[in-house]
Image (cartoon, helix red, strand yellow):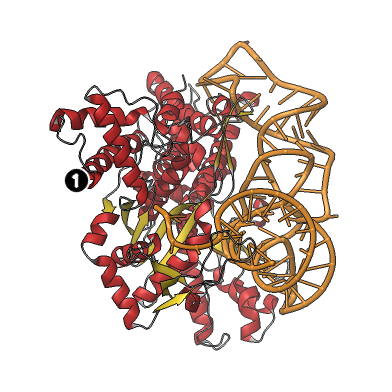
Amino acid sequence: MSLYARFATALDAILDDLTAAGTLPADLPRKNVSVEPPRDASHGDLATNAAMVLAKPAGTNPRALAGEIASRLEKVEGVTAVEIAGPGFINIRLDEVAWRDELAAIHAAGADYGRSRTGEGEAVNIEYVSANPTGPMHMGHCRGAVVGDALASLLEWAGYRVVREYYVNDAGSQVDTLARSAHLRYREALGEDVGEIPEGLYPGDYLKPVGAMLAEEYGDRWVGKAESEWLPLFKKRTVAAMMDLIRVDLALLGIHHDVFASEAELQEAGKVDEAMRTLMDKGLVYEGTLEPPKGEVPDDWEPVELTLFRSTRFGDDQDRPMKKSDGSWTYFGADAAYHLQKAKGVDHLVNIWGADHAGTVKRVQSAVTALTDGKVDLDVKLVQMVKLMRAGEPIKMSKRSGNFVTLADVVREVGKDVVRFMMLTRKADAMLEFDFAKVVEASKDNPVFYVQYAHARISSLHRKAKALGLDKGEADLSLLDGEELALVQKAAQFPRIVEQAALAHEPHRIAFYLYDLAAALHAAWNRGNDHPEKRFLIEDNPEVSRSRLALARGIGQVLRNGLKIMGVEAAEEMR
RNA sequence: GCGCCCGUAGCUCAGCUGGAUAGAGCACGUGCCUUCUAAGCAUGUGGUCGCAGGUUCGAAUCCUGCCGGGCGCACCA
């Protein structure tokens, strides 16, 4: 149990005591009671707002209640002083032993330090990437991929059971286009001069190998035949080929999904009908006509009778069509069924979507609520665009010419770790600039470098210590002074940060925390410049060297664990 | 016109789901390399938290209304 969790438990027991004594009424909600490190270190090691939160419902005033709590807190093991401050904060000072113990706890937990049972083993399905299978991944997909993957491991660290899932949109009209494009490449592979790729088909070279493969396998069997004869086959084969490309791209980022769910298979298996029947049984489906869109009405608008889902019942601003007028499923219709499928066997759903899909969030949440009777919740994380830059100049991309920056190119140029880290240096719903020049720069500007550098320095300490023979024997942690233990204090926050980041579904918090921790390490390191006796390694003082090496090792461990969540390798040295 | 997101130092952004004097980096000023990696550290200047109300012990954070920017708005995916 982390130090903060331990004191939260101790405080809980005290509040139970006060309730038993009649000072506090029974059944007071303690949800907002917190035990945290105060922002200002001069206030002590821990602070709680318990008195302020509980005073009012208890019909007393905060400072009086604080007194009651404080006198009991003083008796808790490891507490050296308790002060009441401001409107009723209770500040706690701990014996330095508490921090030495925490450092020992970091070593003991090792690669697991920071894991918790917050999630109580609940299952979460997180769907991310889900790029249309019409070509290789480009940078537009990259951020969602990294955010989703980091969030998935973050949730695992917090004690959730996680399913990583990719939804393959292989049922829409764009895969027909894909199959036609592949058929053209197929004819080309058989020696036909196809000339320019016609408008409306995918021009990319990546379809050439697919055409060649199909030519190899089928010869001219599908030349000059009606489209209806070859389209289904070409669709299936081309989508499969595209998914292979995409899996390779994802692997470059270290991303591997547990489940690839096919929209086409979902429809063929009758899952969509099933979901709609469920909704019909609940009286949430009807045949009707939608209002024309507000504002600019399209020229070709005309009222059409459609099969609609009553999403307005759940807070959407309009009911949404499940079937098109030709009787086929809408994207939403299939999506509703898909979410029902995902919801079976899990407690929570998370989707990572591009911000341009913001308008569709409510309808899908409505469907999930309706289909699971509110038992499963869906959180949709909207990920904003990445602005690609090169030395301050925006990189122009044009979809029509197929001139977009592929994910593989970027990973090749700057490396997986840089891409992953950078994608997590902003909260998901804020725009992110990715400058090729800056992200490989070896300076403070570049958070990837800065954090890696801290870890590399620690690794370098180990090498040095080994060379000097300073690494042998037990470390006596009591030799660490207050300044050094402040570093432990910073590291000790890691479990809380992981827990809170997981609850908020915000993996970027890990990146910011690691930057902070790295800064603290760099600061401690540089103290040795002005005061040689404060260096981590002192040749003629093996005892002190060992204790400080143990400190550094603890910080290194936390840096590694944080980077692990982000899917970034820790650097042993900078090159 | 409607919905969602955003508005915090000159610039780029954090702000731990309502806490104490709002924080980093860049930029600018000043210090620190016979040194465990100075690729770094320390220190200073810089704020009407878009505006106006409200909620309460307490608001950058929650509510309402404006202002400004982005995205999306019938059967597309």
Image quadrant holding the N terminus of chain A, namely: bottom left
Apparent side of residue A300 relative to residue A242 in the rendered image (left or right): right
Residue A356 in view (yes/no): yes
Q: Residue at x 45, y 39 (%)?
A: A559
Measured as percent of width and height from the top left, residue A18 is found at 54, 82
Apparent side of residue A555 relative to residue A157 in the rendered image (left or right): right
Measured as percent of width and height from the top left, residue A111 is found at 35, 44
From this view, report whether residue A19 is shown above or below residue A70: below
* Nearer to me, A35 or A321: A321
Measured as percent of width and height from the top left, residue A30 is found at 53, 76
Q: What's under tag 1, amino acid-wise?
A: Glu
Measured as percent of width and height from the top left, residue A451 is found at 51, 34
From this view, report whether residue A231 is shown above or below residue A23: above
Q: Residue at x 31, y 65 (%)?
A: A346
- For disc 1, the chain is A
Residue A542 in view (yes/no): no
Residue under numbered circle 1: A229
> Crowding at label 1, few (<14), some or many (≥20) Cα neighbours within 10 Å?
few
Apparent side of residue B64 relative to residue A193 in the rendered image (left or right): right
Q: Residue at x 37, y 53 (%)?
A: A157
